[in-house]
Image (cartoon, rainbow, N blue to C red):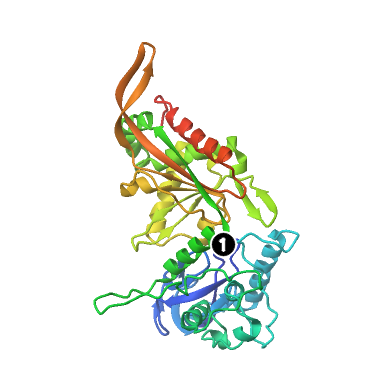
């Protein structure tokens, strides 16, 4: 028998550590290679981690709640094969992950809101090590180094975890000090602004980890970006007629259905090429113009939470290619099979509120993007249609587009022209398009 170390896997290009959520197996259990043995959380996604070898789970090295660096050992598996060289490679994997992040980092120290920090192995004033996530929370909440040193840690070797920080903020009896005399503390979902009366008949539901993350990011986005929304109504008749005519043949040919979402993403990608200043991010006083057009699509999960996987280089895909990506990402999202890379790098987002029967919505921008579009329900309406022999009233399939954008860098003219151009592409869809 031989023992091999199971290492924390690399879960994305920008991910250098993860938090152990749940062990699905316990010490002494028999496990198969590629069988899921634990769940790990990063700042982007929760994912199941499969076993690297088959055998017996001899020892668990990282307990639930621990923050573990990529490449660090998390368990020992007893196998029937020869000894593995994994232990000697673990440090090299960690160093490789760090080097990749350092190489990809901008020349100056300013970073975008959702870009990860390089892991800092220098201990704090109290001699303890803090993860970038914990440091970020402390900075956001105005917690000083001396105050941070007094927070009890439940992680490995007494490390303070994200949950420790959330518990501390929840139970904190006094507000966090302001960062500066002239700057008000940033709002926090952990500290309600008004007292809430709770009666005996009320049900108290604790937010899960994903809901807490969504709530905090929504608060952050409304604080960071002055939101403005422009609306346009698009005639979707050509697309509706084409889909009704071709959906059965499409399913027979490709083995899956085609929804309206690929049409929306295709039109948005084309409009971004026409108006590239929508495809930007803000970094302090700088505007970062993105070359790649990576479109996120909001997916509602069975839990009621929301997740936004990314279709990379959407402008380089045809309708069939986009449809396959949409179906794949949506299915994996609902089955908790997305990776961190599936959620990284988005430059624009589309949200289909029409799938819930809503005619329009005013979505919140996912930072550090500067715009998001909501598409409403497609509804039959009487409309005036121009013909060579004059105007007529006809039944048409209509849909509202709602374009929310960051007014710091996107003015009404650009925001309005962009959503109008998306509608133009949808209305101009060719009924003779082949599959």
The residue at the point 40 percent across, 48 percent down is: 361
Q: Quadrant of residue 137?
A: bottom right
Q: Where is residue 18 in the image (x, y as percent from the top left)?
A: 54, 72
Instruction: Pick out the residue farthest to the top.
Output: 389
**Quarter where residue 278 is shown:** top right
Q: How far from the left and from the top, in percent, is residue 400?
A: 39, 39
Rendered location of residue 95, percent (x, y) = 68, 71
16 vs 87, nearest the viewer: 16
* Quadrant showing the C terminus: top left
Question: Which element is circle 1 on?
Answer: loop
- The residue under label 1 is 12
Would residue 169 be found to the left or right of residue 257 on screen? right
Residue drawn where x is 32% and y is 18% of the image = 392
**In the current view of this chain or complex, which residue is farthest to the front?**
182
Q: Is residue 263 above or below residue 38?
A: above
Q: In this view, does 55 lie above or below 101?
A: below
């Amino acid at each position: 028998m031989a023992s091999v170390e199971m290492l924390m896997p690399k879960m994305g290009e920008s991910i250098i550590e993860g938090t152990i959520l749940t062990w699905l197996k316990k010490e002494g259990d028999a496990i198969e290679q590629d069988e899921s043995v634990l769940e790990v959380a990063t700042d982007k996604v929760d994912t199941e981690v499969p076993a690297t070898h088959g055998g017996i789970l001899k020892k668990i090295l990282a307990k639930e709640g621990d923050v573990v660096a990529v490449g660090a050992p998390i368990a020992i598996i007893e196998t029937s094969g020869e000894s593995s060289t994994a232990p000697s490679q673990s440090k090299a994997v960690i160093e490789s992950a760090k080097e990749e992040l350092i190489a990809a980092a901008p020349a100056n120290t300013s970073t975008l809101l959702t870009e990860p920090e390089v892991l800092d192995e220098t201990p704090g004033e109290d001699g303890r090590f803090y993860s970038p996530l914990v440091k970020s929370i402390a900075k956001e909440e105005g917690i000083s180094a001396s105050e941070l040193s007094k927070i009890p840690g439940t992680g490995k070797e007494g490390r303070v975890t994200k949950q420790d920080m959330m518990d501390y903020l929840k139970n904190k009896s006094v507000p966090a000090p302001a960062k500066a005399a002239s700057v008000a503390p940033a709002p926090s979902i952990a500290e309600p602004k008004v007292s809430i009366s709770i009666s005996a008949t009320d049900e108290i539901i604790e937010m899960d980890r994903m809901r807490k993350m969504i709530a905090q990011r929504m608060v952050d986005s409304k604080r960071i970006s002055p939101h403005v929304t422009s609306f346009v109504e698009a005639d979707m008749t050509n697309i509706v007629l084409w889909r009704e005519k071709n959906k059965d043949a499409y399913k027979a040919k490709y083995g899956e259905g085609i929804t309206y979402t690929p049409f929306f993403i295709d039109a948005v990608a084309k409009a971004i090429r026409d108006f590239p200043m929508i495809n930007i991010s803000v970094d302090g006083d700088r505007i970062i113009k993105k070359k790649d057009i990576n479109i996120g699509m909001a997916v509602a999960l069975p839990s009621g939470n929301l997740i936004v996987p990314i279709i990379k280089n959407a402008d380089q895909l045809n309708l069939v290619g986009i449809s396959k990506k949409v179906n794949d990402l949506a299915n994996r999202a609902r089955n908790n099979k997305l990776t961190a890379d599936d959620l990284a790098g988005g430059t624009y987002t589309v949200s289909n509120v029409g799938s819930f029967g809503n005619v329009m919505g005013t979505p919140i921008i996912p930072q550090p993007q500067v715009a998001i579009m909501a598409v409403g329900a497609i509804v039959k309406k009487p409309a005036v249609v121009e013909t060579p022999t004059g105007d007529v009233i006809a039944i048409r399939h209509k849909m509202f587009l709602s374009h929310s954008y960051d007014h710091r860098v996107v003015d009404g003219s650009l925001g309005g022209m962009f959503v109008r151009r998306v509608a133009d592409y949808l209305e101009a869809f060719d009924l003779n398009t082949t599959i």
